[in-house]
């Protein structure tokens, strides 16, 4: 099978098309990056033919939540719960922005990892310390365009400092003392408007959206104003919610016993344009609110396990009718950025809770969460994650002769429980082959990896001084201990 270019008319011929709930034979006609016919297709005279006979063709995977800012951070942390993890991450302690070359190399590295593992579309919740600017956004857009991955770039913003986002007591607040100034609401909104005007392409390869960091890190004005713009301009709006027990305690202490989901609901901030990330510590009432408002939840199980957050109540969310997508989170807590691996965890780990086995997520459900159920999180409506006319042509050709599919009993189960990146023969995004036989077609990978190594080494020097980190760690440890003893109305840990 040979590659094709974007803008071509292409027929993917003779593959077995894999949907979450079935496999069918069929050709796929692609015109201008869109699937225009599925079934028995007569090729137009100018069409490029891609032979997929003997192979499986699946929709490309969608990573509904990750942070490209962490692409240089694999292996940096271990056994750090989120509050302490933050102290060690550059997001809290950095004072100088990275150079455009660093940002470009960093973004391209993540795009490579995702594309090679079959992710064709990602939602990048982009933080840039000390703050996001058009100059720091530019190389992110350029890297995604050059790699050929579809990207929804969320402006990750906060107007409260890290210290202000924690339920510190007076002594702790005094000891904390120094912290960089936070950006103004007006400044944040102005950059957002300019970024949307410059790069947002609603049905194209680059989308811009809003990522107010989390309710405890943003003023009500920031949350409401970004939502107002998102609704006016049809942008994605995503925020982190109730990832940890500390956040349960924070919300209930600050809001007279209400959860952050209830607070967002009471301010009219839940709805079909809202995506809530993590949703680990949800009460029944929280789940009801999310379901009633058609809000989407992003399940980041690999990250939650790694940081000891607890395990989200996925079966309860699904039973209530909540739409759930999957997100790897950043490389600081999920090194591989591999959505297929995440689908595997999703289809296995929830069995550890026991309960009614009819509620355990299946491979097909996890595959749907990684494809069609996630489309709405990207801002592309229902046009991603499906092999249907009218959908964007983001596809994987899976090697039908590989050991993974030998013998072939149930393709979806074998893909979710046993698939690996080496089973992917080619990756097509918007009609163009961007990975062929495991290698990116548009990027010299060796050159790119060398550049990433060089830039990551220069970045490491900019991390905060160890003395300051130790001091903050001591303070945050106290908060974490209080939260551990807090009587939460739900428990997201599996009992020992
Ligand atoms: Zn995140």
Image (cartoon, rainbow, N blue to C red):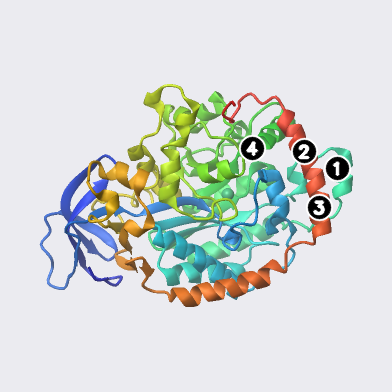
Mark before the other along the chain sequence, 2 or 1: 1
Give the class, few, some or many, for how many residues have Cα within 10 Å of label 1's Cα (few <14, many ≥20): some
The residue wearing badge 1 is: 172
Q: CA distance from mark 2 to mark 4?
A: 12 Å
Residue at the outermost top position: 356
Disc 3 secondary structure class: helix
The residue wearing badge 4 is: 244
Q: Picture quarter containing residue 490?
A: top right
Q: Picture quarter containing residue 46?
A: bottom left
The residue wearing badge 3 is: 470
- Residue 206 shown left or right of residue 9 in the figure: right
Which sits in the foreground, 195 or 96? 96
Instruction: Give the foreground label among 1 and 3.
Output: 3
Exactly how many numbered labels are in the figure? Answer: 4
Asked if 231 appears above or below 436 in the picture, the reply is: above
Mark before the other along the chain sequence, 4 or 1: 1
The residue wearing badge 2 is: 479
Task: Locate the C terminus by quadrant.
Answer: top right
Q: CA distance from mark 1 to mark 3?
A: 14 Å
Query: Looking at the image, can residue 37 be seen?
Result: yes
Q: CA distance from mark 4 to mark 1?
A: 20 Å
Disc 2 secondary structure class: helix
Mark before the other along the chain sequence, 1 or 3: 1
Disc 1 secondary structure class: helix
């Amino acid at each position: 099978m040979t590659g094709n270019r974007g803008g071509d008319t292409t027929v993917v011929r003779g593959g077995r098309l894999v949907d979450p709930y079935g496999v069918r034979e069929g050709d796929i006609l692609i015109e201008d990056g869109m699937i225009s016919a599925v079934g028995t297709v007569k090729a137009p005279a100018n069409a490029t033919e891609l032979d997929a006979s003997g192979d499986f063709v699946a929709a490309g995977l969608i990573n509904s939540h990750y942070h490209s800012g962490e692409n240089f951070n694999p292996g940096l942390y271990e056994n750090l719960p989120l509050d302490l993890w933050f102290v060690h991450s550059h997001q809290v302690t950095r004072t100088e922005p990275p150079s455009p070359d660093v940002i470009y190399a960093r973004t391209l590295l993540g795009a490579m990892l995702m594309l090679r593992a079959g992710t064709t579309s990602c939602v990048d919740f982009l933080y840039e310390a000390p703050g996001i600017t058009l100059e720091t956004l530019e190389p992110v857009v350029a890297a995604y365009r050059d790699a050929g991955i579809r990207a929804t770039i969320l402006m990750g913003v906060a107007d409260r400092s890290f210290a202000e986002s924690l339920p510190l007591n007076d002594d702790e607040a005094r000891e904390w003392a120094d912290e960089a100034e936070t950006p103004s609401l007006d400044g944040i909104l102005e950059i957002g408007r300019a970024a949307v005007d410059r790069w947002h392409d609603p049905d194209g390869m680059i989308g811009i959206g809003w990522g107010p960091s989390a309710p405890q890190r943003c003023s009500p004005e920031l949350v409401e104003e970004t939502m107002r713009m998102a609704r006016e301009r049809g942008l994605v709006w995503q925020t982190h919610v109730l990832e940890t027990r500390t956040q349960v305690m924070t919300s209930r202490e600050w809001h007279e016993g209400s959860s952050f989901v209830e607070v967002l609901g009471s301010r009219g901030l839940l709805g079909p344009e809202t995506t809530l990330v993590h949703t680990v510590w949800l009460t029944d009432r929280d789940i009801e609110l999310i379901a009633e408002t058609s809000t989407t939840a992003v399940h980041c199980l690999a990250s939650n396990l790694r940081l000891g957050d607890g395990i989200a109540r996925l079966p309860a969310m699904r039973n209530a009718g909540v739409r759930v997508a999957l997100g790897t989170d950043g490389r600081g807590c999920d090194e591989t950025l591999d959505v297929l691996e995440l689908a595997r965890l999703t289809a296995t780990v929830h069995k550890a809770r026991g309960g009614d086995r009819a509620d355990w997520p299946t491979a097909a459900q996890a595959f749907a969460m990684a494809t069609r159920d996630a489309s709405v999180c990207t801002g592309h409506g229902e046009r991603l994650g499906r092999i249907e006319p009218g959908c964007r042509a983001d596809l994987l050709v899976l090697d039908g002769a590989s050991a993974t599919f030998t013998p072939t009993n149930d393709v979806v189960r074998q893909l979710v429980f046993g698939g690996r990146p080496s089973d992917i023969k080619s990756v097509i995004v918007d009609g163009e082959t961007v990975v062929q036989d495991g290698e990116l077609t548009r990027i010299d990978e060796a050159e790119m990896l060398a550049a990433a190594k060089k830039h990551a080494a220069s970045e490491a020097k900019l991390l905060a001084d160890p003395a300051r980190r130790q001091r903050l760690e001591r303070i945050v440890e106290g908060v974490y201990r209080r939260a551990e003893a807090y009587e939460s109305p739900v428990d997201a840990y599996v009992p020992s």
